[in-house]
Image (cartoon, rainbow, N blue to C red):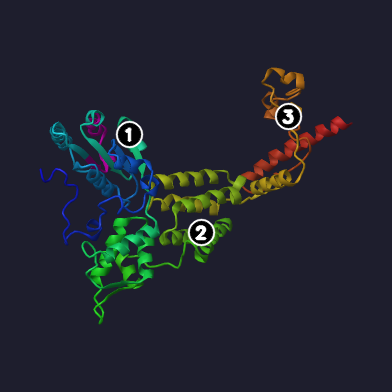
């Protein structure tokens, strides 16, 4: 029975640093405070041994496999692992049969399935009866949104927890621990790593702990000791280790703001080449792709607006694509949206309109809703004159009838003559002319 509660492979010097440094307890686990912080649901469930079947969803290197090992160890469960790429239905039935036998003696089984989204519907359906009956507890890991890629019956029987990319400070802490650990890390070696080198590895690892530790290991093992016997890991060695050079770009300082400013102004200035360059720089430097997507959406509306309404559609689609596919592919829809906006006709008239109207609301007298526009659906509305004399536009030729929608004649939106807005201007000029003619007729 010595292997009943075995949850981790043996640690040997031949294993990669990322494997050797795998956290063994929740206390060692880095990041994911939103689900594992004190009082959070998943942590409470683990500590109380009330884990049901769960699906861990997040990008590579965020700790899905490690967390599964920790859960098995914490709940004293047998850890069985299958792969969504390699394992068959026969493999699953073998694990299920073993779990049934184990359960008769009171022992629990956790079945961890890596890349569970790779299982087809029939394979996923095999799990359902035993997951539901509690023969085994399933932990599925996937980089894909389970609500799109995993069968609904299996998702409905599981709790879904989303893991986020690790922050730079989290990764710095992991590397410092690995350099100091004498048992599993490089504590027995004399390594002097500059803060600049470690920060470069942390930033360029894109929140992936495995990638970060692997790069650190390459840097340490390929850098010969100096005359003092110390391995000096500097920025140049770090760049070689992760095969990316350091770009002058700090997410909290001038380079961040200067680059995003250049990016926006290049799109506004209709220079797709410059816009794509600044986009590439931000992506290379590790800028948050969601931040970039938000700026593109804003630019599509603020600087293109009604001159090309499709620009906002493209920008929002790119924003959704970024969340859906992640890096590295997310750079493609971001580039498409950037180029669309840079090459689109420009108009800031929508932005100017809401700014002017907002000033009036903030600084001027609040206008009352005209009686003919007020809600007339309740019984006493007619007695108050609400809705009286309201004209339904669709009853008139062209779908328009001259009618006041503000108690005072104010103009906020003044379309330009560019792109699609040229046609908008023609329609609006015509409608405003009809309204003015009717107003003059009433006065005479």
Nearer to us of marks 1 and 2 is 1
User: Residue 157 placed where, x, y %?
Assistant: 31, 31
> Is residue 345 visible in the rendered structure shown here?
no
At x 35%, y 39%, the residue is 160
Return the mark for residue 275. 2
Tell me: 434 left or right of 101: right
User: Residue 378 placed where, x, y %?
Assistant: 67, 20
Are the residues tagged 3 and 2 within 8 Å (C-beta)? no
Where does label 1 land, which residue? 155
Q: Main secondary structure of the magenta part?
A: helix
At x 78%, y 39%, the residue is 409
Cα–Cα span, label 1 and label 2: 41 Å
- Foreground of the two, 230 or 117: 230
Q: Quadrant of the N terminus?
A: top left
Above or below: residue 339 compared with residue 259 = above
Q: Secondary structure at mark 2?
A: helix
Q: Secondary structure at mark 3?
A: loop
Q: Indicate the quadrant where residue 192 lies.
A: bottom left
How many residues crowd mark 1 within 10 Å: few (<14), some (14–19), many (20+)?
some
Q: Residue furthest bottom?
A: 227
- Foreground of the two, 319 or 435: 319
Q: Write the start and end of the magenta stretch as one range.
A: 111-128
Return the mark for residue 401. 3
């Amino acid at each position: 029975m010595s292997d009943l509660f075995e949850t981790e492979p043996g640690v040997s010097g031949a294993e990669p640093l990322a494997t050797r440094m795998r956290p063994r307890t929740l206390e060692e686990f880095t990041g994911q405070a939103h689900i594992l912080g004190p009082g959070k649901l998943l942590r409470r469930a683990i500590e109380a041994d009330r884990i049901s079947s769960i699906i861990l969803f997040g990008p590579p290197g965020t700790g899905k496999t490690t967390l599964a090992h920790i859960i098995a160890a914490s709940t004293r469960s047998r850890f069985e692992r299958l792969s969504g790429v390699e394992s068959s239905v026969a493999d699953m039935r073998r694990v299920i049969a073993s779990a049934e036998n184990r359960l008769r003696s009171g022992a629990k089984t956790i079945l961890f399935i890596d890349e569970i989204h790779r299982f087809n519907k029939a394979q996923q359906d095999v799990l359902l009866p035993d997951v539901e009956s509690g023969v085994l507890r399933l932990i599925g890991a996937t980089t894909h949104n389970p609500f799109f890629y995993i069968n609904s019956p299996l998702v409905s029987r599981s709790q879904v927890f989303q893991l986020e990319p690790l922050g730079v400070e989290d990764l710095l802490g992991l590397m410092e621990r690995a350099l100091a650990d004498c048992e599993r890390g490089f504590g027995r070696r004399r390594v002097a790593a500059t803060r600049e080198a470690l920060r470069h590895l942390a930033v360029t690892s894109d929140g992936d702990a495995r990638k970060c530790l692997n790069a650190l290991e390459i840097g340490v093992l390929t850098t010969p000791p100096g005359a003092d016997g110390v391995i000096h890991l500097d920025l140049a060695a770090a760049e070689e280790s992760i095969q990316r050079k350091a770009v002058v770009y700090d997410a909290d300082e001038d380079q961040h703001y200067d680059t995003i400013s250049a990016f926006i102004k290049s799109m506004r200035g209709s220079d797709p080449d410059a816009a794509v360059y600044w986009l590439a720089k931000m992506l290379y430097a590790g800028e948050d792709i969601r931040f970039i997507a938000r700026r593109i959406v804003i630019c599509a509306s603020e600087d293109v607006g009604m001159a090309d309404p499709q620009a906002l559609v493209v920008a929002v689609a790119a924003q959704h694509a970024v969340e859906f596919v992640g890096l590295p592919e997310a750079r493609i829809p971001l580039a498409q949206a950037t180029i669309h906006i840079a090459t689109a006709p420009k108009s800031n008239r929508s932005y100017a309109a809401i700014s002017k109207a907002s000033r009036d609301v903030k600084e001027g007298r609040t206008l009352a809703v005209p009686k003919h526009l007020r809600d007339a659906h309740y019984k006493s509305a007619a007695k108050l004159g609400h809705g009286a004399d309201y004209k339904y536009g669709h009853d008139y030729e062209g779908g328009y009838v001259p009618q006041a929608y503000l108690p005072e004649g104010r103009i906020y939106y003044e379309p330009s003559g560019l792109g699609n807005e040229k046609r908008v201007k023609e329609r609006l000029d015509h409608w405003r002319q009809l309204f003015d003619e009717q107003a003059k007729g009433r006065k005479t």
